[in-house]
Structure formats: C-alpha cells, structure tokens
Image (spheres, rainbow, N blue to C red):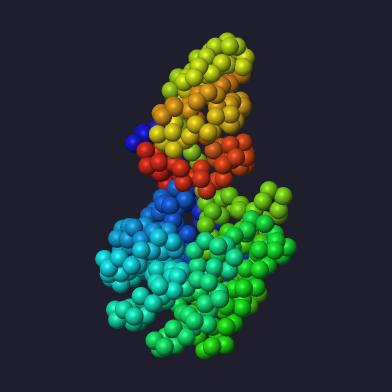
C-alpha cells in the first residue's frame, strides 16, 4: 500500500449528489449502484454512509461475491441487495447463499426463472425480472412475456418484487434517440401486460444516471417506483458534452500523490523508458504513482496542474512512477515531497483529463487498485 498516494472521498459531496437525485426525482426510491467497489470509491464505507446517514436501503452489485461482502461487513444493518449480472444461480452452493443471506438475483433468462419456481426453498423468495428492451445484453426476451406470466401463475405467484430494464443510450436525448424511444415503449408494454394479467408489480425501474439527469421515467410521470443511479452518485454527468443536465453533482473523489523528485531538463534531454525527449527547457516532477496503482501508460500526454502551472505527462508511465513536464518558470516553485493533486483540484479537471485520454470516468475510477488507499472525509 502507498502511504502518500490516496483517493480522498468526500462524503459530504456524496450526500449532495443524493440530495440532487432526490430533488430531480421526488417520490422515487433510490437503488444505489455500488458495483466494482462503488466505482472504485469503496463499497463498504459508501454503503454504510448511505444507509446510516442518508436512509438508502437498496443497493445493486454486479457479482454475488460483492453482495456477500456487503452483507457480511454490514450485517448489523437492514437493507436489500441485488446481483445484476454474474448471479451464477445454477450452482447449488450459490443458491444457498441467496437464500440464507437475503440476496436477490436479477433474473435475466427463462432457465433461471424456472429454477426459482421449481425449487421449494425459493417458494416465497422475491422475484426480480430483467427484460432486454433493446440493449441486447442480459435480459429476458419481451417475446416471452406471455410465457413468463403463465409460468408465474402456474406456480401461484401473483406478484413480482422488482421488474427491471436498462437503457443502452441514456447519455443521448431520451426524447429523440430511436433506441431510447423503443426501449421506453417496450418496457411500458411489458409492465402493462403483467398488470393486465393480474400480476402485481411491487417495484419497477429503468432509469439509470443519464435518464435521471433528463428527468425521464420518474414516478411523477406515472412511471417507475425506483431510480438506479450509478456514475452520478460519484459526481460526473453521464450525458454527452453538448447536453444540458438537471444534475448539479459534485465530484466525490480527489486523487492525490506526491512528488518524489524534481530536476531541470534541457530541450532534447531524454526521460524514462524509451528515452522520450523533452520538447523544450523545463522541469520534470516525478510522481509516486504508476500503472501498478491503476494509473496507466495510456494517460501519457494528459495535462496536470500544480501551483498554477500546467504540466504534461511525458513519456511512458511506469509501474510506480510518472514523469510530468513543467515549464522552466516553475523551477523554484515546484518542489520534491509536495502533495500533488491529479484530479479534484479544480472544477472540471477530471472531465478534462478524461477527454484528453479518451477514457470515460467509469474506467478511470474503477482502474485504481487497492495499493492506493481510500481516505474518507466529512466537511
């Protein structure tokens, strides 16, 4: 573990983001997505804070192991956990875990539903169904809606705990993108069919971050009971740059490291692996972070800022270190052993970093490895 590199997570900013989501979607219950270690921010501290301070009671994971960790480490708290993708329900030992740990698998194919319906132990277990309305990833086929309803009725199931779908293009205009229009229409038709068939839908949701930002699929429209925010919980918008968002989010994290060494260079001097030449006279600051921390070589060329100076990552990022080139005017200002903020220092610096590296915030967050400790702060 690093001792002077860290991801500082501001829980007040997380609280603000939940407040903004509630303001956009009053009346909706929030199912917080905390998969991939809460998008790299630490699943356990984030979920604990969300429950104890913000009243959130439902969480989404990607894998059963994530859900088990959440249940085991927060076993004194009451909450629901959904496993959205890697449910592995066909393994007998996993079925036992779902039953005994009160973990809800999101069922996305008929064989999984058959297993639940035909297994005595699951007779009273809540059923969560996910339909593929156009994303063509996981999900039940809408053509099988009648078949699924009949299966439920045959086993005297008169309700579905949660009916789910997921938008493929929520970063685009909900009212004009043809796939968004199609998905919304299909999900409405599926919900209507269930209800017309006498199946109660206790919960329904389709709205992910980009949809919430566009105020689509919310309870006040007579639509769904829940929203499922993901990226927006942690600050960034999910919308395309040209679109206006209703979300006034705050970046939850600040990535900090420190400067190992500072030295002057002349134009043409080479640094690092592959001997990258310096473009002009200047200063090199060596940061204590590299791809061994989840800070990758493909970040080379991105601009970083320190003490009012603009620097650029030069040459190859190595396993443990990164070279940043600064103008020669910084020679007596930038010093070794100083804390260096990679993102979170100024408004929009994470977005600029992502635009320059052509890597979305999801990947940048999730890439950070456990060697970079997470530190949690209030106020």
Q: Is residue 23 above or below residue 10?
A: below
The residue shown at (54%, 54%) is 231
The residue shown at (67%, 57%) is 172
Looking at this view, is 102 or 129 the one in front?
Answer: 129
Q: Is residue 193 above or below residue 181?
A: below
The residue shown at (40%, 60%) is 86
Q: Does any portion of residue 82 appear in the rendered image?
A: yes
Looking at this view, is 251 or 274 the one in front?
Answer: 274
Q: Does any portion of residue 346 appear in the rendered image?
A: no
Task: Name the quadrant of the N terminus.
Answer: top left
Q: Position of residue 328 (x, y in %)?
A: 60, 15
The residue shown at (29%, 81%) is 120
Q: Is residue 349 above or below residue 153?
A: above
Q: Position of residue 121 (x, y in %)?
A: 29, 79
Looking at this view, is 140 or 100 the one in front?
Answer: 140
Left of 70 or right of it: where is 323?
right
Q: How many marks?
A: 0
Q: Position of residue 23 (x, y in %)?
A: 61, 64
Looking at this view, is 144 or 224 the one in front?
Answer: 144
């Amino acid at each position: 573990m690093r001792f002077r590199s860290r991801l500082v997570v501001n829980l007040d900013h997380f609280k603000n983001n939940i407040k903004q989501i509630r303001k956009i979607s009053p009346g909706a219950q929030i199912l917080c997505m905390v998969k991939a270690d809460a998008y790299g921010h630490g699943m356990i501290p984030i979920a604990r804070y969300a429950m104890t301070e913000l009243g959130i009671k439902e969480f989404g994971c990607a894998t059963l192991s994530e859900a088990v960790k959440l249940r085991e480490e927060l076993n004194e708290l009451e909450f629901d956990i959904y496993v959205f993708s890697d449910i592995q329900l066909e393994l007998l030992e996993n079925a036992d875990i779902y039953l005994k740990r009160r973990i809800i698998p999101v069922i996305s194919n008929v064989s999984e539903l058959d297993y639940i319906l035909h297994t005595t132990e699951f007779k009273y277990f809540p059923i969560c169904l996910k339909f593929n309305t156009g994303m063509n990833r996981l999900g039940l086929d809408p053509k099988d809606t009648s078949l699924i309803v009949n299966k439920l009725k045959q086993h005297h199931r008169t309700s579905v705990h949660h009916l789910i779908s997921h938008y493929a293009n929520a970063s685009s205009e909900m009212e004009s993108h043809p796939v968004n229009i199609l998905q919304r229409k299909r999900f409405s038709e599926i919900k209507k069919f269930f209800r017309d068939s006498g199946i109660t839908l206790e919960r329904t949701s389709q709205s992910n971050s980009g949809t919430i930002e566009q105020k689509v699929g919310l309870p006040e429209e007579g639509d769904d009971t829940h929203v499922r925010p993901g990226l927006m919980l942690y600050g960034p918008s999910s919308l395309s740059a040209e679109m206006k968002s209703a979300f006034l989010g705050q970046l939850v994290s600040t990535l900090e490291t420190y400067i190992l060494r500072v030295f002057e260079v002349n134009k043409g001097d080479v640094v690092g692996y592959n001997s990258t030449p310096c473009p002009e006279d200047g200063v090199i600051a060596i940061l204590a972070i590299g791809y061994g921390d989840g800070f990758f070589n493909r970040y080379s060329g991105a601009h970083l800022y320190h003490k009012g100076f603009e620097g650029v990552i030069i040459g190859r990022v190595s396993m443990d270190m990164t070279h940043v080139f600064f103008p020669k005017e910084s020679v007596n200002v930038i010093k070794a052993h100083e804390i260096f903020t990679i993102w979170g220092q100024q408004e929009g610096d994470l977005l600029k970093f992502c635009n320059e590296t052509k890597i979305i915030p999801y990947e940048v967050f999730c890439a950070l490895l456990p060697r970079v400790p997470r530190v949690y702060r209030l106020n």
